[in-house]
């Protein structure tokens, strides 16, 4: 689906923010490990639906309750899987690998689209060291990935934490089910996305699992633990998706109310958008039920680390185009191994509108201009966050976007919501 998002004069109204993709996935993947869980208001995005379906593939029984609530009943180590389809979800893929290895049986984990190029070697290498016969495709060990048996063992385990926190979260979910205790040590020069690890630990705690963390790099995971189920897990609203609507409010004449479940009980990596916006001198108000913002607003440039929130890179880059001075976005090297290379692909597309953008291995430099070329074609590279960031850019200057349907990976209702607020957008 290709879309033209025209320059929009004003946005006004209220929307209800979608549920967190990250917490929805964690809820389903942890719930399948045992017990009876009630998961309230999970996301209906592609990746969350994949997680729900994988829970079924692992033998969990799911019943839809009122509205969008689910009851999931699972027995520990009950899987008899031979084939597992993870769609195009990188998070679900990484979480599945050690879970599938728990049973010491043969399995084939399949995926589609961008998963065929996403790296898993750090995780598969660690699983081999733990006794699993596992092999992916090529040097990066992408899908399909075959498990040919082998009993996963505990003990002292090392894994590189400089590329993706998903590898660590995957082990944190699986290792409490081992017979032996695990001492998990993170290697790598610079750890990334640590908040996502905290998110995993928070959901595990809700189901009765105990993990001791003595430092950012060291975890002690007792074995033979019982997953009691998530008694009533209300999935919070997704602040990473709120970032796109907040940016839309900043760049247009606007008066927006973003309603949602915004309790600070559960940390969100993309919750960094709020302090980042404050550093950019953006004004908004937030309660546990809503965020309110009016625009347009002036944007203060500067230097911003995205080490623990790489998914914010596309929308931060769009905002930076309209800042009052040069912007440096750094600590972003791990954004190259997402659905797209979010550094090079983002730079390549922004050059089409005449932007002054330069990249290094770990940085993006943006020198704002007074005006940009309008009505240009921008390719989302099948990356949902690029697609939505470009749509927000279109509200300011007008752009045409290829493959806008990729938004369904995290926010299927994005276009519907911005249209309801007054955006001028149509299929072409």
Image: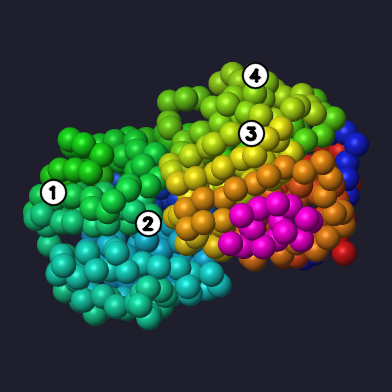
- From the viewer's perspective, is 391 left or right of 281? right
In the drawing, what numbered circle is on residue 301? 3
Q: Upstream in the sequence, badge 2 or badge 3? A: 2
Q: Gap in Å between the C-alphas at discs 2 and 4?
A: 34 Å
Determine crowd level at label 4: few under 14, some 14-19, many 20+ residues with C-alpha closer than 10 A: few
Q: Gap in Å between the C-alphas at discs 4 and 3?
A: 21 Å
Q: Secondary structure at mark 1?
A: strand
In the picture, the quarter occupied by the C terminus is: bottom right
- Range of magenta residues: 344-358
Residue 345, horizontal then vertical, whole percent:
62, 62
Q: Upstream in the sequence, badge 1 or badge 2? A: 2
Q: Gap in Å between the C-alphas at discs 4 and 1?
A: 43 Å
Q: Gap in Å between the C-alphas at discs 1 and 2?
A: 20 Å
- Nearer to the camera, 415 or 282: 282
- Is residue 407 visible in the rendered structure shown here? no
Residue 363, horizontal then vertical, whole percent:
51, 50
Image marks 1 and 2: residues in contact by CB distance under 8 Å: no
Q: Upstream in the sequence, badge 4 or badge 1? A: 1
Q: Gap in Å between the C-alphas at discs 2 and 3?
A: 27 Å
In the drawing, what numbered circle is on residue 285? 4
Residue 221, horizontal then vertical, whole percent:
16, 45
Q: Residue at x 32, y 48 (%)?
A: 190
* 393 to 77, vertically: above or below: above
């Amino acid at each position: 689906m290709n879309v033209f998002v025209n320059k929009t004069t004003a946005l006004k109204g209220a929307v209800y923010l979608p549920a967190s993709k990250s917490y929805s996935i964690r809820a389903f993947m942890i719930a399948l490990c045992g017990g009876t869980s009630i998961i309230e208001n999970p996301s209906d995005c592609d990746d969350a639906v994949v997680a729900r379906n994988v829970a079924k593939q692992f033998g969990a029984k799911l019943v839809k309750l009122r509205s969008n609530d689910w009851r999931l009943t699972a027995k520990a180590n009950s899987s008899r899987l031979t084939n597992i389809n993870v769609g195009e979800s990188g998070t679900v893929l990484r979480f599945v690998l050690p879970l599938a290895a728990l049973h010491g049986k043969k399995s084939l984990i399949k995926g589609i689209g961008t998963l065929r190029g996403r790296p898993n070697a750090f995780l598969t290498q660690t699983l081999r060291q733990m006794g699993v016969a596992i092999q992916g495709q090529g040097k990066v060990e992408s899908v399909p990935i075959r498990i040919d048996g082998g009993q996963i063992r505990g003990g002292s385990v090392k894994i590189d934490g400089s590329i993706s926190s998903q590898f660590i979260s995957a082990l944190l979910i699986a290792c409490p089910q081992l017979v032996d205790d695990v001492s998990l040590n993170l290697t790598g020069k610079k750890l990334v996305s640590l908040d996502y690890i905290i998110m995993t630990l928070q959901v595990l705690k809700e189901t009765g699992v105990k993990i001791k963390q003595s430092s950012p790099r060291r975890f002690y995971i007792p074995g033979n633990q019982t997953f009691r189920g998530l008694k009533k897990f209300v999935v919070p609203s997704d602040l990473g998706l709120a970032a796109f609507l907040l940016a839309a409010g900043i760049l247009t004449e606007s008066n927006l109310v973003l309603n949602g479940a915004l309790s600070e009980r559960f940390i969100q990596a993309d919750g960094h958008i709020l302090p980042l916006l404050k550093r950019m001198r953006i004004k908004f108000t937030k309660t546990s039920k809503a965020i309110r913002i009016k625009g347009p607003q002036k944007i203060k440039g500067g230097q911003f680390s995205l080490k623990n929130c790489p998914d914010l890179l596309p929308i931060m880059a769009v905002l930076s185009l309209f800042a009052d001075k040069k912007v440096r976005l750094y600590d972003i090297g791990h954004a190259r191994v997402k659905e797209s290379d979010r550094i090079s692909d983002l730079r390549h597309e922004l050059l089409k509108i005449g932007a002054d953008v330069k990249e290094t291995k770990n940085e993006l430099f943006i020198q704002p201009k007074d005006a940009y070329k309008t009505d240009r074609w921008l390719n989302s590279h099948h990356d949902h966050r690029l697609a939505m960031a470009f749509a927000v850019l279109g509200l300011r200057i007008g752009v045409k976007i290829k493959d806008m349907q990729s938004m369904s990976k995290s926010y299927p209702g994005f276009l519907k919501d911005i249209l309801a607020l007054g955006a001028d957008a149509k299929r072409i």
